[in-house]
Image (spheres, helix red, strand yellow):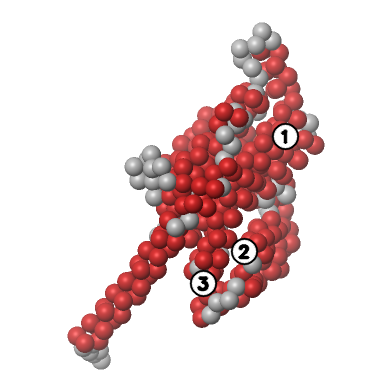
Amino acid sequence: MSVTISFGTIWDAIFKMEALLTTQMDMIYDHFEILDGMQQIVGENLSLLAPIERAWQPADYLPNLNADDWCQQIQNFRTAAQGLSDEALVVLVGDMVTEEALPSYSVSLNLIARDYDGTNSKPWAKWMRGWSAEENRHGDLLNAYLRLTGRVDMRSVETTIHHLIANGFNPRAYPDPYNGLVYTSFQERATRISHANVAKLVAVQGDPNLAKICLRIAGDEARHEAFYTLMAGKIMDVDPAGGILAFREMMRGLIAMPGRLMYDGKDADLFDHFAVVAQRLGVYTVHDYAAIIQHLVKTWDIASRSVSGAAAKAQEYLCKQADRYLAHADKIADFQRSLPPVTFSWIQGRAV
């Protein structure tokens, strides 16, 4: 049996593919044009970055090594951390490692700012550099905290950071800048929730120093979330169909977690194991994931947008997406609670 395909059929397929790619590239070009047209409103909201001269710095939350009583300050700092559970330490290290991989996030999210020379003076570029500068303090502070308390194996933690940055990060936003705004809106809220919940947890376990640190970081994430959510909302106003389709594209699968490629040189499933501990502790759960989707659907007024065709189908999908996760949230939580303990090199190989 033979199959004959005419050259005409092949050329028709090629022309259709070229037409589709041309349409997609035109759309992406339009999206960049719309973002560029938002420079003024971005500039008006640069106030969501803290003025550097008044911003907090890691040293504000750590023992003062220049003080005469520096040794006693460190001892008090270490004593307060002794009550932290192994589970809390695992979640804290996972959060810190994720924060320390900032270089990868800045590179991937430059899709939004397009600051190719590194010193662009446009508001989008100023925001992205300012955002990176503020985020950089988070990993610095958590790293110093863990080092001073002596509660974890810092070489293992450092190896994990090294691997994560070397492995890179793909938020699955390329090539559409709209996707990047949806991603950051979601992820900044998720990070705020996680740090705030860790603050509550460690306060109960008796470490007010760490509780203050995590609340301060959560406060930064709240400002960053406000910016990205506002900008994505403006996209929804200007280009509702494009914005909704981008939102749908990012929700097609699970949002790519920034630390998902973490590796300590031993555990190939390290991120999944860390995520299970976070779920068990209530630091970041499927319920939280669903609640973020609900929040964004409501904040961006997805249900009321006047769209048609593919965008209308995406609109319907998004309005039901949170319920899909909530329907399985309890079963997932029960399953994760049933999993056997896993050892973590971060805590000298103990199992949690």
Residue in the foreground of this view, choosing between 236 and 156: 236
Dot 3 surroundings within 10 Å: few (below 14), some, or many (20 or more)?
A: many
Residue occupying the point 74% across, 22% down: 79
* Residue tagged 2: 300
Furthest residue in direction left, as rendered: 7
Q: In the image, which disc is placed on residue 211?
A: 1
The residues tagged by marks 3 and 1 sit, at their Cα atoms, a distance apart of 42 Å
Residue 266 position (above or below residue 348): below
Dot 1 surroundings within 10 Å: few (below 14), some, or many (20 or more)?
A: many
Residue in the foreground of this view, choosing between 234 and 276: 234
Q: Amino acid at mark 2?
A: Trp
Furthest residue in direction top, as rendered: 68
The answer to whether 210 appears left or right of 257 in the picture is right
The answer to whether 310 appears left or right of 175 in the picture is right
Residue 4 visible in the picture: yes
The local secondary structure at tag 1 comes to helix
Q: In the image, which disc is placed on residue 241?
A: 3
Disc nearer the start of the sequence (3/1): 1
The residues tagged by marks 2 and 1 sit, at their Cα atoms, a distance apart of 32 Å
